[in-house]
């Protein structure tokens, strides 16, 4: 047996003792190995150790009361399921261990030696509330390297200085990461990820659609009037109490805010909620503030509305009789729905036919940013009507398609002209985006023309969020780092 310090072999026995080792359960019963171990003398004059205990290869390790196989099981339970989950699994396998002990063994696992990557990915993630962290990923091997709390430039710059030789860094449009990479790795090529570029453009499109909410009603076609001999109700432009109230509030709010007063000051002076004041102050006309009634949704009675109108005109005004006739024609609905449907006819109004609801700004933004070939026919028709009614959204659609063409062709040559169009578009949201892209234009060009991207970062952050949820969001940064890195390497061995 060789001495663990000097490596010289010794056969002179000092003493013997019995060592107890826990092993994997057999047949559902725990196994305890009792092993007689020798303690040997080290006779080398150059060695400071006088005695040492012999170790059985594959069975014993110094200061450990478990076999390597059982210890590996405990460690993997901690990596896969963390504290409580790992303890429950070990209890099923007849290896009783507390959750704190599982975490203790997990934290003792040495992390793989860090290797300086050629292509690096950097992105942030939410730890909790308003606290964020930074994740660093090797984009070539797709393995996480480390993570830490915070997303300031100095931390990233210090890590990059400790790992020289990085050639490419993929990031989002963050000014903090841009500055950190410039300070820590000035020779590295920065790539502004195309996903984040498209995401930023999509948010601006949603803001523009929200600012032109009044144009979105053009997406719904005009409802076909129901056949009726009675006169219709009052038109939309008729004077109603709600419209008069909206007009008075609009004039009162603008009389205060147009003088330069703040939203909160105007709210205090008028005795209104600040959200109400903000809504009226942002509106360009009082008509935008009038609450519109929600269109009725289609029901199972809609196919029979024409028959109801016909029978009503013929003189049948009893809802019970009309319901029985509809049941004979295949209607499966309740009598009450028929009674409600003919109620407008009793007041001299037409039957309330279902109308298509105007799309939300988010829906319009999704239509604009979706490839035309992947839009449905219905969405395409509605978007065409909106573009015809709103020049601003039509212009936004054309600019988005131009940028999409650059991404598809990986050609950044039209980028300067496109940025000029954004600046002169008279759309504040796009003008702000043009300014941000212009300041980061070299990295944006790399993001458009090169195959490097932050897809690996986003995938690892998704996995990181899963590990956080497994630990109920209570894991600290050291434990989270340990599990994320070890889990990624474990998947390489057990895919």
Image: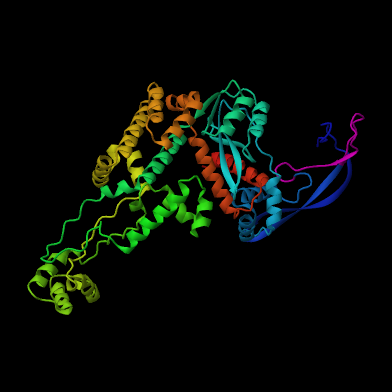
Q: In the rendered view, would you say 316 is above or below 17?
A: below
Q: Residue at (22%, 66%) from the top-left corner?
A: 300
Q: Which residues are magenta?
A: 40-60
Residue in view at x 58 percent, y 39 percent? 489
Relative depth, front residue between 216 and 266: 266
Q: Which quarter of the figure has residue 243?
A: bottom left
Which residue lies at the image location 51% right of the left edge and 42% below the top edge? 495
Q: Looking at the picture, does residue 456 appear above or below residue 305?
A: above
Q: Dominant secondary structure of the magenta stretch?
A: loop
Relative image position of residue 21 (x, y in whole percent)? 74, 52
Residue 53 lies within the magenta run: yes
Percent position of residue 81, x then y:
60, 52
Of residues 388 and 466, the one nearer the viewer is 388
Which quarter of the rendering shows the N terminus? top right
Closest to the observer, 402 or 417: 417
Q: Is residue 458 left or right of residue 1?
A: left
Q: Is residue 78 magenta?
A: no
274 is higher (above) or lower (below) than 334: above
Question: What is the x, y in percent for residue 63?
Answer: 79, 47
């Amino acid at each position: 047996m060789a001495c663990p310090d000097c490596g010289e072999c010794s056969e002179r026995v000092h003493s013997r003792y019995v060592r107890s080792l826990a092993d994997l359960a057999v047949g559902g019963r725990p196994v305890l190995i009792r092993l007689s171990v020798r303690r040997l003398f080290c006779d080398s004059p150059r060695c400071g150790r006088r005695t040492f205990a012999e170790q059985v290869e594959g069975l014993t390790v110094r200061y450990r009361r478990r076999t390597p196989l059982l210890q590996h099981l405990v460690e993997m339970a901690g990596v896969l399921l963390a504290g409580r989950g790992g303890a429950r699994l070990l209890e099923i396998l007849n290896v009783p261990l507390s959750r704190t002990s599982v975490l203790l063994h997990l934290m003792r696992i040495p992390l793989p030696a860090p290797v300086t990557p050629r292509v690096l990915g950097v992105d942030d993630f939410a730890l909790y509330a308003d606290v964020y962290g930074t994740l660093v990923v090797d984009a070539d091997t797709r393995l996480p390297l480390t993570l830490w709390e915070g997303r300031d430039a100095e931390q990233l710059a210090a890590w990059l200085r400790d790992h020289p030789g990085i050639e490419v860094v993929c990031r989002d449009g963050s000014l903090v990461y841009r500055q950190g990479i410039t300070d820590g790795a000035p020779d590295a090529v920065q790539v502004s990820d195309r996903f984040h570029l498209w995401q930023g453009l999509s948010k601006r499109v949603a803001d523009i659609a929200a600012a032109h909410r009044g144009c979105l009603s053009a997406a719904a076609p005009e409802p076909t009037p129901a056949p009726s001999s009675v006169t219709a109700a009052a038109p939309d432009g008729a004077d109603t109490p709600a419209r008069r109230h909206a007009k008075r509030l609009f004039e009162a709010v603008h009389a205060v805010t147009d003088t330069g007063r703040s939203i909160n000051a105007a709210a205090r002076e008028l005795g209104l909620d600040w959200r109400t004041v903000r809504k009226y102050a942002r509106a360009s006309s009082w008509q935008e503030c009038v609450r519109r009634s929600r269109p009725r949704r289609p029901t199972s009675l809609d196919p029979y509305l024409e028959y109801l109108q016909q029978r009503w005109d013929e003189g049948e005004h009893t809802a019970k009789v009309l319901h029985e006739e509809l049941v004979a024609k295949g209607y499966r609905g309740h009598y009450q729905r028929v009674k409600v449907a003919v109620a407008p006819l009793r007041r001299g109004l037409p039957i309330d036919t279902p109308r298509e609801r105007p799309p939300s700004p988010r829906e319009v933004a999704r239509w604009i940013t979706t490839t035309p070939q992947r839009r449905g026919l219905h969405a395409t028709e509605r978007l065409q009507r909106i573009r015809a009614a709103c020049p601003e959204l039509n212009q936004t659609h054309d600019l988005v398609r131009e940028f999409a063409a650059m991404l598809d062709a990986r050609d950044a040559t039209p980028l300067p002209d496109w940025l000029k169009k954004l600046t002169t578009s008279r759309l504040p949201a796009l003008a702000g985006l043009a300014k941000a892209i212009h300041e980061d234009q070299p990295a944006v060009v790399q993001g458009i023309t090169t195959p490097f991207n932050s897809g690996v970062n986003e995938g690892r952050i998704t996995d990181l969020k899963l590990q956080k949820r497994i630990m109920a969001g209570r894991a600290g940064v050291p434990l989270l780092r340990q599990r994320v890195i070890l889990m990624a390497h474990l998947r390489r061995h057990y895919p």
